[in-house]
Amino acid sequence: MFKKRTLILLLFVVAKFILQYLLIHSSYDLHRDEYLHLDQAKHLACGFDSVPPFTSWVSYLILQLGNGVFWVKFFPALFGVLTMIVVWKTVEALGGNLFALVLSATAILLSALLRLNILYQPNSFDVLAWTAFYYAVIRYIQSGQNKWFYAAAVVFAIGFLNKYNIAFLLLGTIPAVLLTTYRKVFTSRHLYFALMVALLIVSPNLLWQFKNDFPVFHHLKELSDTQLVNVNRADFFKDQLLFFIGAIFMIVTAWVSFFAYQPHKKFQLVFWSFVFTMLLFIYLKAKSYYAIGLYPVLIAFGAVYIEALTVNGWKRYLRIASILFVVFFSWMLIKIGFPSNSPEYLIQHKQETYRKYGLLRWEDGKDHELPQDFADMLGWSELAKKVDAAYDTIRDKEHTLVFCDNYGLAGAVNYYSKYKNINAVSMNADYIDWFPPASKEIKNLILVKDTFDIDPGRQKEIPLFGSVILKDRVENPMQEKKAPGCTCCWMQKSPSCIILLKR
C-alpha cells in the first residue's frame, strides 16, 4: 500500500509540473512582477521596498542556474507541488486512506493554484507556508508534542520573510485558540521559546525595516490608496467560489465535519482560524487571492470526511462522482483562467466569458480587453529589443544610464537585453535604491517612458539634449493596456536623443 500511495503521489507531482508549463501560450513573456523579483538577485539585502528577502534568495538560485524561463517557472511550480504534498501528508495524519488522498490531490491539482503557480511571485510560497503552518498545528493537536510549536514558528518565520500576508493568519489564529480549549497553550513556556525562535529568524528583516523607516507601511498605504480602494467585497466573495470551484463541496463538508464528525471536533481551532482570518480580510477589503492559503487544509479535512461518509454500499459510488465533480468543474475554470491561447484568440472568442466572471476587472476598478495578469505578460521582449537598438547607437556605453518610468519597464529591459550590464533603473519600487553611485559620470541618458501624452514635444528636456530623434515603437497593441502611451528613450548630449514609442 505504501508503494502504491507513493507511486500515485509521484504521478500527481509529474502532472502538476507538466501542467504548469503547458498552460502558457508561447506568445506571452514573463509577467511584469517577475522581472522585479529576478533583478533582486543582483542586489541581495535583508529587505526590499516591495517584498521581504526570501524571493531574492530564490532569484539568486535562478540566476546561478542561468536565469532561463524554465527555471523561472520551475520554482513556483515546485512550491505548488510541495503544497500538494503537505495536503497529502495532512490527509494521512487525519487517518485518510487512498480515496481521500486521491480526491484531495485532484482538488489541489485542478484549482486556482494552477493559475497562481504559473507566475514567479511570492504568492506560491505564501500558500505553501500557510498550509504547512496548519499541518504543524494539526500535528500538535494530535500529539501534544512541543516540537510542533517550533515547527509552526519556523514555518511562520520563513513565510513572513516571503510575504507579510501570513501575519493575517497569525492574527486570525490567536482568537481561534482563545475560543477553544487549546487556550491553555498560552501557559506553555515552549510557545514563547518558539516565538523567540521565529523572532530571531525574522529579526534581520525587522532591523532592515527599522533602518529604512519601515517602507512596508508606505507600501501598504500606497496599495490601499491605489488598489484596495477599488476592491469590491462582492467580487471578493465571488472569487472565493471560483478559486476552488471544483472542491466547493469538500470545503463545505470540512466545515460540517468540525461539528458533526467526532474525529474532527478537536480541530475546531482550524475552523475558527478560517473564520477570523476571513473577517480580517473582508474588513480590510483585501485582494481576494490573499485568502487562498486558507483552503488547502480544508480540502484535506473535507476529503477525509467524505471518505468516512462513503464507506459502505451504494455510497461508494459517490466517491467516483466526487472525483468527476472536481475534474468537470475545475476544467471549466481552467478553460478560461489561463493564457493558453494567443491574446488575439482570447479577445475574439473569450472576452464575454471573462467579463461574465469579472476577470476583465483590473486593479484600477475598470474592465479591459484582457485579464490583467495576461496583459502584464505582453510586449516586454519586443520593448527590450528596441531599447537595445537605441543602446547600439551609443558609443560611450559606460557613461550611459537607462532610466525607466516603472519597475516593469526596467526589469524587462534588464532581463531581455543582450547587454547583461545595461542595468536599467527607475524611481519606482526597489529600483530607486539601485542607481549607480553619484560619483559616476552620466553622459547619455536613455529614458524609457510609460506615456508620451504629456509634453509630446519634450519641451522640458530639449534644453538638456543635443537633439531629439523618434526611433521606434512597440507594436504589440495589448502590452500595458492599463497605461497607454509610449516608451521613449532619450540620450543626453552626444551623439543624439532617441525616442521609442510603444505604439
Image (cartoon, helix red, strand yellow):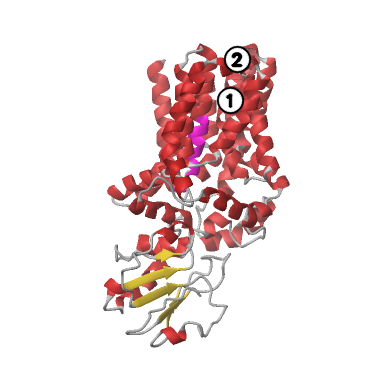
> Element under label 1?
helix
Is residue 126 on the magenta stretch? yes
Q: Which residue is mark 1?
A: 320
- Which quadrant would the N terminus be assigned to in this image? top left
Q: Work out whether 185 lies above or below 282.
A: above
**Within the magenta stretch, is there residue 313?**
no
Q: Which mark is residue 441?
A: none
Q: Position of residue 326 (x, y in %)?
A: 59, 33
Majority secondary structure of the magenta segment? helix
Q: Is residue 123 above or below residue 299?
A: below
Nearer to me, 256 or 278? 278
Left or right of residue 239, residue 142 in this image: left
Identify the magenta region: 118-131
**Percent coordinates x, y for residue 158 in the rendering:** 44, 35
- In front: 480, or 161? 161
Q: Up-down: is 293 above or below 431? A: above
Looking at the picture, which amino acid does disc 1 mark?
Answer: Ile
Considering only order in the chain, which callout, 1 or 2, is on the residue closer to the N terminus? 2
Q: Nearer the viewer, mark 2 or mark 1?
A: 2
Q: Nearer the viewer, residue 8 or 487?
A: 487
The residue under label 2 is which amino acid type?
A: Lys
Q: Residue at x 37, y 69 (%)?
A: 385
Mark 1, residues whose alpha carbon is within 10 Å: few (<14), some, or many (≥20)? few
Which x, y percent locates residue 194?
Answer: 47, 23
- Residue 279: image quadrant is top right
The picture places residue 153, in percent across and down from the top left corner, at: 47, 27
Residue highlighted by disc 2: 184
SS class of the residue under badge 2? helix
